[in-house]
Image (cartoon, grey):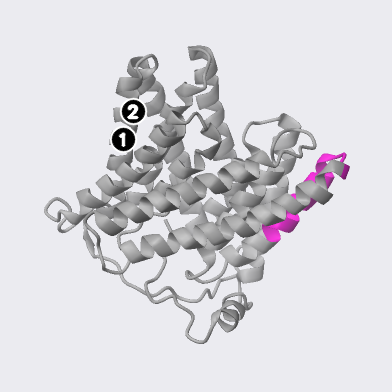
Amino acid sequence: MNAVTENSAPPAGWWPWLRCELAPFPGRGVRTLRMVATVVIVTIISMAWQTPETAVSAYMVFFVSKENPALTLRTGIGLLVGATLGVGLSLLLYRFTFDYAELRIPVMAATIFFGMFLSRVSVIGPLGFAIGFIVALTQSMAESAPDADALVRALLWTWVFVVFPGVLTVMVSQTLMPDVKSHRPPAHGGGKNKHGLFVADAFTNPDYPRFALKVTLAAMSCYVIYMGVDWPGIHTAFITCCFIALESTTATIRKGWLRLAGCLVGGTLGFLSILFLIPHMESILSLALLAAAGAALAGWVAAGGERIAYAGLQIALAFFMCIFQGFGPEVNFTTIRDRLVGIILGLAVSSAIFLYLWPERGAGRP
């Protein structure tokens, strides 16, 4: 998870600050080009092979892409391992939870807690987070699966549409101008020294389990809400709670605002695309060019400094969620509405829990 710094307020107004954050620097254009090229390849493959969840596949390009090929390679390997273990563990757990929601919901909560706890105390925190999140997310698929065979296919397809974009992202980063170094503006804030596999106070500091519990409460509260009102389209609330969480209450809320702002920008662009462009598209190439245009804007923001980069990922996610609704021209505006409602719900629930339940005031770490 990317950090959002505590001292990220613009010193001289929003417009000068935004101009500074969007200014070019060495390596930014190359990284943006890599993301655009990979998104185009992912779009063509997903449409040609009709793999599910093209929007998620395109977003994984941004998730894996880092400021240099070495970091991208490590992230890609972590994604491959985490997705494989997560899907495998979820398949194993379904032997006991498929017909028993009363067991499945506690399993979801336990895996979120485990993943978020590891994200705070371990050097393999991102891997632990990925495993916990994927298990929790795939366990929720049982609600819409008509039978066990359909559920197994959905889980295996989940592995495919999550992993293959990561592999492509690594391949492009290693071949497209791989020696260009990025001089990205440095992030502020510090981290905690780790000794071996865990931080020194991993099992004595109560802040770590409290943090994991807060994220679990927020995510599961959103899950219960959207299942209770039978509105699965706002499941982005569950995802939001997991992905905006940082140690500091202030940093978590600020990251939530970046997510909201990015999704508003991406959602608006997606809305305009559905309104004016998509109804006239007749080929995969035209859709790939539209995806490339959105990826270029989102990629430029995502390749910036830590104070704005997270918004770029959210621009990409919202835009792709809007334009990739099927394997033909789609003009369904309900998707945009549901995604934004889910994000707002997740932001509100997370903010309330982090503000009033064991608030942490220290700076977030990368």
342 vs 121, left or right, is right
Contact? badges 1 and 2 (CB < 8 Å)? yes
Label 1 crowd (10 A; few <14 / some 14-19 / many >=20): some
Among the 4 quarters of the image, the one containing residue 253? bottom left
The amino acid type of the residue labelled 2 equals: Ile
**Residue plotted at (43% across, 46% down):** 78
In the image, 121 versus 9, the foreground residue is 9
Residue pointed to by mark 1 = 109
Q: Is residue 15 above or below residue 356?
A: below
The amino acid type of the residue labelled 1 equals: Ala
Tag 2 secondary structure: helix
Give the magenta range: 280-296
In the image, 23 versus 73, the foreground residue is 23
State the CA–CA distance, disc 1 to disc 2: 6 Å
Q: Residue 48 location in percent, x, y?
A: 76, 33
Among the 4 quarters of the image, the one containing residue 224? top left
Q: Residue furthest left?
A: 204
Q: Is residue 176 above or below residue 83?
A: below
In the image, 293 versus 357, the foreground residue is 357
In the image, 11 versus 123, the foreground residue is 11
Q: Quadrant of the N terminus?
A: bottom left
Dot label at residue 105: 2
Q: Quadrant of the C terminus?
A: bottom left
**Residue plotted at (76% across, 40% down):** 331
Tag 1 secondary structure: helix
Specify whether residue 192 is painted magenta. no
